Amino acid sequence: MVIKEIFTPDIAITWLPWAVQYFFMMGLAYASVWVATIHLFSQPKPDDRLLKLCACLMLTAGIVAPIALLADLHQPLRAWHFYAQVRPDSWMWYGAFLLPVFSGTSAVFAWLLLRQYLPKHTTNQDSDWVNKIGQLLRFGDWDSDKFIKPIAIITALSACSIALYTGMETMAIKARPLWHTYWLPPLMAMSALLAACGTLVVLNRLLTGYQQRTQDSLLLWVRASFGLFALCLIGWALFDKGSAPEAALLLETSPSWQLAAIWVLVTLAVLALMLAIRHLPNVAMLIVSLTAIHLAWGFRWIVLIQAQTDPKYGAGTYLYQLPWGPEGLLGIAGTFGLWLTLMALVSELIRHTPAAKLAR
Amino acid sequence: MDKSKRQFLGKMASVSVGAALIPVVQVYAQDDKRSPQMHSASEGQVGKRYGMVIDLRRCVGCQACTVACTIENQPPLGQFRTTVQQYEVSQQEDTTPPAFLMLPRLCNHCEKPPCIPVCPTGATFQRKDGIVVVNNEWCVGCGYCVQACPYDARFINHDTNTADKCTFCAHRLDAGLLPACVETCVGEARVIGDLNDPNSQISQLLATNKTDIKVLKPTANTAPRVFYIGMSSAFEHRISGQAPVRTLLTDTGEEIHHGH
């Protein structure tokens, strides 16, 4: 039997690019918490530069992510409705509680790591207003280092809860076969780790006080996270019974999915080849990092936006064109702009004592 | 004017006034009859289980239901609570001309609706008569239910910015009327009724056509309560076929993109 669709409606996407921004920014935040915590507990003499960069990233991305999430709600002012009843069957409802916990703990963790860089209280009249704000944010000159490790454990657990809920929230949707796979949460988490490591490399370059040692250890992190992400992707392609066949079906018929597959494979190949080089020159390291960030963001775009063009009942794929406004390009640019602004603000506050050492 | 003529006109006037009052009197009579069983819009009609049978042999694809629903429920331009999708069906290497299948689509008001458990605020729920509704004053517009529906029956209403869907015209059912799509169907292809009542038209239809009753995506474990008569099993699951030329329009109706 040959069936041709003659007249069917085109279904618009429901989760907008804001969702990609939320998943991306939140991934940066929770993965940088993991990097910082693992580093703190695995190294006898932790790299202060790495911890500083992680703190900047978890703080700024951790602020931007919930804003992007609120924007993806079509009724953001009703967000308090999440807390007005019990909905134990909804992953999103659990997320509404896990997210503020993570925002709080990651902000405290970042503050503890950055506190040593905030200017100490002085009676110097010459200090500028940024310095004065920095002094205020230090909340006195008491010793807070003993709280770092306990808070690191709590924040890392909270980061795991965010990785779990964001992955499961999407995976739980049976109606979208592309999403409904247990490979999705690990794929999301590993790509988040890859993006966070790449961003940390870029931040190491951008923020004053570049450290070669930090870049060297980050290269190991990038290699490990890329390997794990690639393994998850191969595992999904080989062993998944629902999502992977659906993707194969789309590959057969849809030019946009063919393009996406070529892009993923080429990016993976470029990264694999470059990471295989034993001593990466600094420029190559920057290219690797930017490619890793772009892969993780693009992966989220394919999973969250392009997957919504896969009809649940009809044939072919639905059309989607990125709008210019807040529901499209402006939203994406705005989120990144906000993140850059926050990064500039944080780096400005901590610039006064760039060479501080943790007293451990 | 003579007296008899004046009397005649006067009588005619009183008759026409009386005729004008007839519907009003009828409406009140209906209300009086119904008032002891009044129910809240969120609770629904206790004891009933609404379902719909769509007899595809009777559907001519005129889209009168689509229009009636749009007039009744006023969704934004380009968004629909119900549509009639049209397919050309032919046999491979067949010389006979292709057949056309008209497939009316709407919310299935499933017995196990996957859209309800995912809702993080409880804004969408099932009434006691089985109708799945959305409290759009409580909905946060997260779109989670839209993703969870296997039938693409839900959408985010661009005017209210909340989840929207077919309600079986619950407001009309509660007032003793038929849903707009059922009321307007020229072929009487859509039949709505109480599945709990063995004597209802829908129960009788389901019993009579027992061997020819199908639902969409029976393996999705949703137990739909919209049943189709005369549907080929090729349409039970996701269509495996050729997609139409799709066009993407701006809000003003300007074409911005099209594809196959």
Image: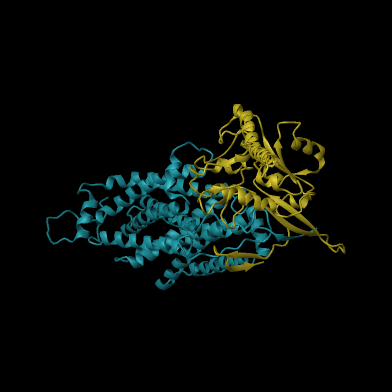
Chain colours: A cyan, B yellow
Q: How many marks?
A: 0
Query: Picture coordinates of residue B226 (x, y %)?
Result: 70, 43
Outermost residue toward the top?
B36
Check the image and report above or below for B212 versus A320: above
Q: Can residue B128 be seen in this view?
A: yes
Q: In which quarter of the image is residue B16?
A: top right
Check the image and report above or below for B29 versus A212: above
Quarter of the image where the N terminus of chain B is located: top right
Outermost residue toward the front?
B2
Query: Picture coordinates of residue B130 (x, y %)?
Result: 63, 36
Front residue (pair A15, B7): B7
Front residue (pair B21, A235): B21
Front residue (pair A212, A108): A108
Quarter of the image where the C terminus of chain B is located: bottom right
A24 displayed left or right of B223 = left
Front residue (pair A247, B225): B225
Query: Picture coordinates of residue B166 (x, y %)?
Result: 62, 46
Q: Residue at x 26, y 59 (%)?
A: A349
A29 displayed left or right of B132 = left
Check the image and report above or below for A284 versus B77: below
Q: Residue at x 59, y 68 (%)?
A: B255
Q: Can residue A240 be seen in this view?
A: no
Query: Picture coordinates of residue B177 (x, y %)?
Result: 65, 39
Check the image and report above or below for B165 versus B21: below
Q: Residue at x 52, y 66 (%)?
A: A272
